[in-house]
Structures are given as C-alpha cells and as structure tokens.
Image (cartoon, rainbow, N blue to C red):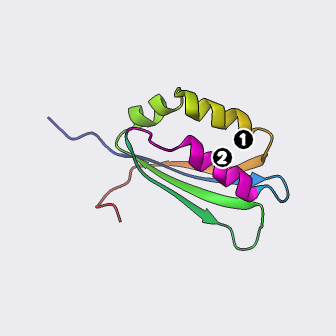
C-alpha cells in the first residue's frame, strides 16, 4: 500500500493595525494538540508590522480537514474575525523530505 502524501499550506495573513501579536496568539492557541499536524511555523513579515506568513505541514489532507471541525479551532476562528484585516496568497503544497 502506498504511503499517503503529506499536505501543506503556506499563506499570508494581515491583522488590523497593532493586532498582529494578538492574532498570532489566537492562531497558536487554536492549533494546539491537533492530531496529524506535523509543523506549524509562523514568520513575521519584516516590512509590514501587521502581516505574517504561516507554513503548515500535515500528515495528510484529511487531518487538516478534520481539524477545521474541532471546537478549539472553531472558537479561535470566530475570535480571529475581529483581529483579521485580510488574507494574502494561500498555496497548497506537498511537503517532501524529513521535517526539520
């Protein structure tokens, strides 16, 4: 039986002015202890104090889809709505190789 492909997402989010740290904390809290999540990296944008990038690596796409229905994730998503000014590019990927 073939191994299932890993699933990855890379995306940019922009918080309302001065709310970036609060938005990041909300995302981190909502993504704790989520089955199938292999990596969740946040990188601050150097030239925009309200923007950041998220790189997610999942065991498989079904794990990512299942997490979206988890109560903690839904609660964080509701809270994010008042902090989020917008989203930039969102790219689905197939991560390969060993994790860092």
| First along the sequence among labels 1 and 2 | 2
Residue pictured at 31% horizontal, 43% vertical: 5
User: Which numbered dot is residue 26?
Assistant: 2
- Left or right relative to 23: residue 62: left
Q: Residue at x 56, y 27 (%)?
A: 71
Circle 2 residues within 10 Å: few <14, some 14–19, many ≥20: some
Q: Position of residue 87 (x, y in %)?
A: 71, 48
Which label number is shown at residue 90?
none
Residue 56 at what x, y percent from top left? 48, 51
| Label 1 crowd (10 A; few <14 / some 14-19 / many >=20) | some
**Main secondary structure of the magenta stretch:** helix
**For residue 78, side relative to residue 4 (left or right):** right
Rendered-image quadrant of the C terminus:
bottom left
- Of the residues tagged 1 and 2, which is closer to the observer? 2
Location of mark 1 (residue): 80
Q: Which residues are magenta?
A: 20-35
Disc 1 + disc 2, Cβ < 8 Å: yes
Q: Nearer the viewer, residue 19 or 66?
A: 19
Q: Tag 2's secondary structure?
A: helix
Where residue 24 sits: x, y (%)? 66, 54
Quadrant in the picture for residue 58 = top left
């Amino acid at each position: 039986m073939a191994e299932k492909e890993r699933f990855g997402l890379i995306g940019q989010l922009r918080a309302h002015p001065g709310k970036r740290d609060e938005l990041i904390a909300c995302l981190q809290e909502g993504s704790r202890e989520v089955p199938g999540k292999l990596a969740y990296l946040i990188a601050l944008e150097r030239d925009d104090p309200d923007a950041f990038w998220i790189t997610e690596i999942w065991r498989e796409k079904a794990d990512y889809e299942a997490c979206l229905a988890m109560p903690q994730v839904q609660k964080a998503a509701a809270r994010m709505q008042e902090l989020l000014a917008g989203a930039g590019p969102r790219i689905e990927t197939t991560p390969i190789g060993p994790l860092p």
